[in-house]
Amino acid sequence: MLVSGCSSASFGEPYQPPLAPDPQPGVHTYGKVLGHVVMETAYNVSGLSISDGPGVVVQGTTRTKPLAPAGCRDYRDSDILVSFRENASSEEIENLVGSQGCHVKRVIEGAGIYVIGISEGRDPVRAVEDFKSNSLVRHAQPNWVGRVTDINDIGVSLIPNDPNLSRQWAIDAMGLRHAWDKTRGSSGVTVAVIDTGVQVNHPDLVGNIISGYDFYNRTSYVTDHNGHGTHIAGIIGAATNNGLGIAGINWSVSIMPLKAADDSGGGYLSLSEIIEALRYAADHGADVVNMSFQIGDASSGEDFFMEEAIEYAYNKGVTMIAAAGNEGQGWLAYPARHSKVIAVGAIGPDLNRASWSNYGNHIDVVAPGDSIVSTWPMNTFASASGTSMAAPQVAGVAALLISSGVRGPENIRQILHETAMDLGTAGYDDVYGWGLVNAHAAVNGALITEMKIFAGDDDGVSVTPRSEMTSPAAGGFFEIRDVEKGSWHVYGWTDINKNGVIDEGDYFGRTSSKITLTGGVLTGIELRVRPNIGAGITMISKLAED
């Protein structure tokens, strides 16, 4: 279908020969129309029921003080973290540590953070206070320990080792089938997964895993004794179109597994390892970092040493994605709530917020997080739920964006915001943020602020505008001015390939019924647009008959 009077680049330049006549000069224009437009992903809401709770691995975010499960240590009892003032000499530091009856285990490279071993039976909190009282000390704190629950608590459902694309409702919910027409990822894009490790020789991951590091055992072997990290890696980049298992968001990508957990299988992560992993990712070419863990709760402040690590990675151009948390509360977990980290909440197949997903001010977007099928240790596959599963969906789409040429964490954030499928209250809200990540719109640069909105009519072959062309604000709110008096549809169109024709892959939609403008301002108009599939004229003709 052609839009009469429109060029391929804009609506104000000389136009292509129309198939329908332009409005005659001198036609009286009359009033304006206010409304809201939503860019859909063409997903038909699934009948799958949402799980009652995410479990833990399923819970998605590692737990740290004061959220550690009953009976678990909130911090290591064997060491603390200390940094010293710039003017402190090596000799002064050595004397201070020795005078406290402690020893230096190691120094986190580049960060100036000392992991200080303390004697058995000594209270780490008391040791921290003793160090803080010395003028040479810049900052001291316990070495917080996070936790991912053990496998017995998860309720994992093992799946036969065969194609499971039909079970991956997230693929269609995020419009990935259409996004793959533009890009399927690139091995030149690196996504670091800071987690429990990864089964690097999993048959559905082989080829997309690069060398990583185990910061607990100080080795390049990143054995996953829990499953959480392997599950996340598969969401981002399981091998696709290989006749095996599942489809990853990126058919080709370089996943850097960074293990920050111990070997207990319970998924204990310590802050010192997390910080080292984040800095390592920034120093070794990671474009995106997935952080499906949390530090503290709603009452906890930002963590001093983690803040520095986030700033370090951000200044190196790393896009950081983090899980919002799974308490079902109106606050965001840390580091998700950090202003330089993209915070992700979870939705179910009905596109409603999962009851256990956190939400709140400054949430960026939401993504599928319930009943997510992915890779699992021992060459298997499993279904799990949680904001941990939602975060890598966004990390995967961020990697697709980078493979299509987008650079910079703020550019990626803006595109995710301005292409999201709005959910909940119109525009931004603190339950869904800007909405559901929309991979098709994102990789095609279909920013909602560049969509053309207008009133007009069509004959099934061409559309004739009867108003000015306008573009929505971020969030989808629009105002159409100079609308002719009469009855018209309201149209929304993003010309993806800039050819001036409403054809396959473009975003297009119109109101199901006509509006009648008799004077003044007409408000409350809702418009939904979605990817145009199939031959353009056939699709438009069908719409015209509705």
Image: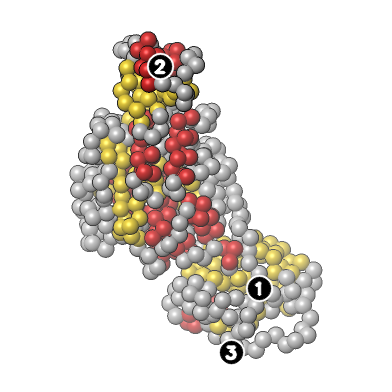
Q: Secondary structure at mark 2?
A: helix
Amino acid type of the residue tagged 1 in the rendering: Met
Residue 92: mark in rendering: 2
Amino acid type of the residue tagged 3 in the rendering: Pro
Residue 469: mark in rendering: 1
Q: Quadrant of residue 17?
A: bottom right
Q: Residue at x 43, y 77 (%)?
A: 534
Q: Secondary structure at mark 1?
A: loop
Instruction: State the residue position of label 3.
Output: 17
Between marks 1 and 2 in the image, the one whose residue lies nearer the viewer: 2
Picture coordinates of residue 42, whole percent (x, y) = 46, 65
The answer to whether residue 269 shows anywhere in this view is yes
For residue 521, side relative to residue 191 (left or right): right
Residue 460, above or below 421 = below
Residue 12: mark in rendering: none
The answer to whether residue 421 shows anywhere in this view is no
- Pick the residue in front: 428 or 509: 428
User: Could you give the CA–CA distance between mark 1 and mark 2, rounded to whole angstroms?
Assistant: 70 Å
Amino acid type of the residue tagged 2 in the rendering: Glu
Q: Residue at x 63, y 70 (%)?
A: 453
Q: Residue at x 66, y 64 (%)?
A: 478
Picture coordinates of residue 204, whole percent (x, y) = 23, 54
Q: Secondary structure at mark 3?
A: loop
- Pick the residue in front: 43 or 402: 402
Q: Residue at x 48, y 40 (%)?
A: 311
Query: Crowdedness of circle 3 by 10 Å Cα count: few (<14), some, many (20+)?
Result: few
Q: Earlier in the sequence, mark 2 or mark 3?
A: 3
Q: Quadrant of residue 20?
A: bottom right
Picture coordinates of residue 101, whole percent (x, y) = 34, 10
For residue 487, side relative to residue 510 (left or right): right
User: Could you give the CA–CA distance between mark 3 and mark 1, rounded to whole angstroms?
Assistant: 18 Å
Between marks 2 and 3 in the image, the one whose residue lies nearer the viewer: 2
